[in-house]
Amino acid sequence: MKNIILTFLLLVYSSISFSQEKQDRILYFVDSIPILDTPDGDDEISNEDIAQLDVFTNLDKIKALGREGKIDKIIYITTKAYLGRSAEVKRIPTSKNMVKNNGVWYPKNSDQAYTGRFIDYFTNGKIQGEGVLKDGIIDGIRTVYYPNGNKRYFYTYANGIENGESEEYFINGKLKQKGSFINKKEIGLWQVFYSTGKLKRQSMFVNNKQDLPKEEMKFHSLLSKGISIMREGDYGGSIKRFDEAAKLNAEYADLYFYRGTAKLNTFDFDNAISDFDNAIALEPLYMEALSNRAFARLRKYEFKDSKTLSKSKEVTVMVAKDNVPIPKDDLDKICSDLKRGFELGDRKPMIIDAMKQYCN
């Protein structure tokens, strides 16, 4: 499915022109909502989502919007999802047509705080989130969705403060986390799950303190310390901490991800891949582990037989090779991981560049 390239900025230089001519500055409206900010990476619209597209260059229309001299063209898009909404739902406002002032939501051009239900939508017209505002402040259940329609999370609020049950979900619809708040503080049992449904960890919050067994506290202390010194560039030291942590809990995906990342940075590619394998076996939707496993395999060939420029206790500098031959089996694995990571939301330029170079 070919996606329409919509830059969605107030003063956009559209990629419509393919010559050296001056490009048009375009303001987009989707279902009557002006697109003033760049949407998130997973907020996309395709040709199949569009029921109607109208282009206006009329100066009077541009003047009416107060954009004279700032834009050259207005594009109005009506989505199929919008046409499928009932008249009642169409009357419910979106927070994208409101302004937030001192923590209070107001309809644009109004000094009266909004009270009532609101619904936000992705640019393809599908629901992005919903909730209720009371005197401009979130109150009750606030729900946010993935682009595929599955629930991303919900939190319960009272006068803008987390109060009550909350749940977060994976993109596949499986429960990721659940727990409750009282006045914005965790209370009672909190549980975290893998996307397979397996329990990852749980703890009790009593009197604003997390109650964990000593061994589990030691595990998380070692894991946190390893992550901290890894970010400082001490990969060898971090691996030692992760090894110690593994003796206490060998069934924790994050442990393998961070240890694999440290090994990747020390050019220990095979062992890095092994750790990423373990992380993904525990959490199949581990976006970062999928991307890093792809690059561990890729770097294994790019740095094969490479010359070492310098080496110290902390850092080894090597020369990478461009356009290296990669066996089809490994190339298929690399591209599968890159594409899966991209689907899960990893849109970093290096991911996109690698996909263009190796996976077309």
Image: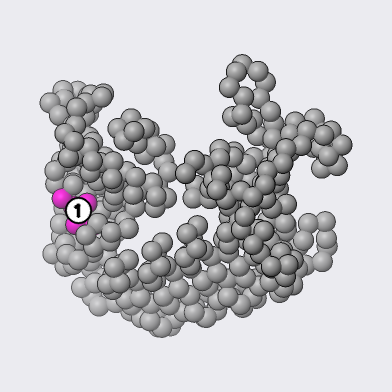
Side (left or right) of 319 relative to 355: left
Viewer-proximal residue among 96 and 162: 96
Side (left or right) of 175 relative to 262: right
| Quarter of the C terminus within the rendering | top left
Q: Is residue 103 visible?
A: no
Viewer-proximal residue among 193 and 328: 328
**Which residue, as the protein is rendered here, is positioned at the far top?**
20
Q: x and y percent of residue 224 in the render?
A: 29, 59
**What are the residue bounds of the magenta stretch?**
274-279
Determine the secondary structure under disc 1. helix
Q: x and y percent of residue 286 in the render?
A: 31, 56
Side (left or right) of 342 relative to 31: left
Write the residue at 41% across / 75% down: 178
Residue flagged by tag 1: what amino acid is it? Asp
Viewer-proximal residue among 257 and 2: 2
Q: In the figure, 137 relative to 290: above or below?
A: below
Write the residue at 82% across / 34% down: 58
Q: x and y percent of residue 295 in the render?
A: 26, 40
What is the quadrant of residue 223 in the picture?
bottom left
Q: Is residue 126 visible?
A: yes
Write the residue at 59% across / 29% down: 15
Residue bearing the label numbered 1: 277
Write the residue at 41% across / 41% down: 348
Residue 276 part of the magenta segment: yes
